[in-house]
Amino acid sequence: MQPFTLVGALFLLLHISSGSTETHRHYRQVLTGNQAGVCRYGRKLECCYGWKKNSKGQCEAQCDHGCKHGECVGPNKCKCFPGYTGKTCNQDLNECGLKPRPCEHRCMNSYGSYKCYCLNGYTLMPDGSCANSRTCSLAHCQYGCEEVQGEIRCLCPSAGLQLGQDERTCVDIDECVTGENLCPYNRQCVNTFGSYYCKCQEGYDLKYVNGKYDCVDLDECVSGTNKCSHHAVCLNTPGSYKCRCKPGFRGNGFECSAIPDSQVRPKQDNEDIKNVIPEPVATQPPRIRQQPFDYDGEVYIGAPVEERQEGELPEEGEEEEEGEDNQLNPRGDVFISEDFESVFGPATEVKEIELGPIQEEFIMDCNFDQGACEWVQDKNDDMDWSVAYHNEGAGAEYYMTMSGLIGEQDDVARLKLLLSDRTQQGSFCLTFDYRVVGHNVGTLRVLLDNIAYPVWEQSQSSDQGWQTELLTVTWKEVAPESIVFEAQRGKGVGGEIGLDNVVLTSGPCQEDIGPLF
């Protein structure tokens, strides 16, 4: 019985030991590699010791004392943010005491960070190093620089450039304005960035002559670039040209129209023609013609006095018949400078108007509707005068105006009245109607081409209607060749500057003169 007892006891002991081993293995913690903080307990997955499941069902580490400036990465294990240290990341890290030093020159520690400083004359770079600020690479010059005695100075690559106010960028020098250009008298200066060049004046062409380039007059008449009428002759001038209507045509040369033939009644068949000395009749007294004319829409123009021989009387055919008019055709051989553009009527003609003994002689009627004057727009101004009508509808009279809705402030429009030789023989009275309407619409001036300052100026008018002005034009030596009406645009918006009824009369102005139109 004893051997059996020993063998049975041994077998029983081994059976109990095996069972306890299986039970221990069933509850042992086993880490998994799929997710941090997850352990396997037999067949179950649970958070490891020191980890806790959050609201998202994930296991997160638990730090009993917390991590003030860091994050908990394991049970009671903190990972500090840069600039902090300690078990709970609650202590400042002195970066200035680290090896190697984070700053090249000077380091100042701050709570959770630090700041580098450089010595005078050096600039802090992004990596914490200090670079010499007295170098061209740090001067930020537009076109490079040079170092002179330790000082950095920016340079400009051309003599036509100069340093701007920031001492770094280069700005252009306008040699055409400063007078530093070397263009000859027959060339025009054109400014460019950093330089300039010379081009031929208008009416000249650059050609290679005698081993060099020079500006030669361009013959517009030969090249066909002129704007003369087909019924006009082109005459070349230095830098320009002139146009003259051919015989049988009239106009300003740019526009020529045929002069109509005189109407002669042909001889009727079976009509006898006899020479009969007419009976003498009493001479009719001359009719006085003055503005306004005594017949609607008609203008009488007599021949110039100098063309009549002494003692010669007008022919019978020249007498005005009732209900008909007799108008002298203006001449067509008029020369217009290219600098101006003819805008009204034919060349300047002188009206011969017979007056009574009280009225003074009218020299020139320059009304824009029926006047016989020559007006030209200045091509060198900023804008042109435009036509406006007093009333709407057919047959409405018009005047010249500069609208306050066109152009910009200080823009100038000039309208020239060319004077004939007869008006230049002595002083005369200039009469015109004007209106300056609108707040800050601008200024109207009257100038003579041989005087630099205006002889009359009006900026604002209290009366919104038309007003009449009389100016006596006199001179000492050289007579003016033209009268300039200049309108300068103001800063206001709206309104207009108007001009109408311009008349020239011989002699000084009479203050008590009545309205002319």
Image (cartoon, rainbow, N blue to C red):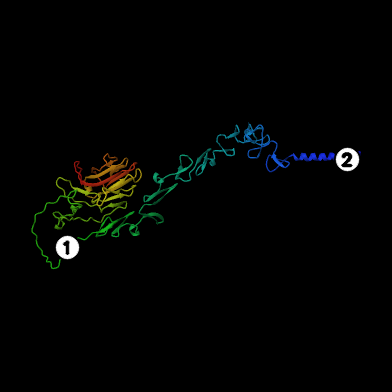
- Alpha carbon separation for disc pair 2 and 1: 175 Å
| Residue in the foreground of this view, choosing between 182 and 264 | 264
- Secondary structure beneath dot 2 equals helix
Q: Is residue 362 left or right of residue 170?
A: left
| Residue type of the residue flagged with mark 1 | Arg
- Where is residue 416? Give x, y as percent: 28, 48
Please give the label number shown on residue 279. none
Q: Is residue 308 left or right of residue 232?
A: left
Residue designated by label 2: 7
Q: Do we see residue 183 in this rendering? A: no
* Occupied quadrant, residue 403: top left
Outermost residue, bottom direction? 270
Q: Is residue 213 left or right of residue 66?
A: left
| Residue in the foreground of this view, choosing between 227 and 311 | 227
Outermost residue, front direction? 1
| Residue type of the residue flagged with mark 2 | Val
User: Dot 2: few (<14), some (14–19), or many (≥20) neighbours within 10 Å?
Assistant: few
Residue designated by label 1: 265
For marks 2 and 1, give the one nearer the viewer: 2
- Where is residue 62? Give x, y as percent: 66, 35
- Secondary structure beneath dot 1 equals loop
Outermost residue, left direction? 279
Question: Is 78 drawn above or below residue 301 in the view shown?
Answer: above
Q: Earlier in the sequence, mark 2 or mark 1?
A: 2
- Where is residue 356? Give x, y as percent: 14, 47
- Where is residue 375? Give x, y as percent: 27, 50
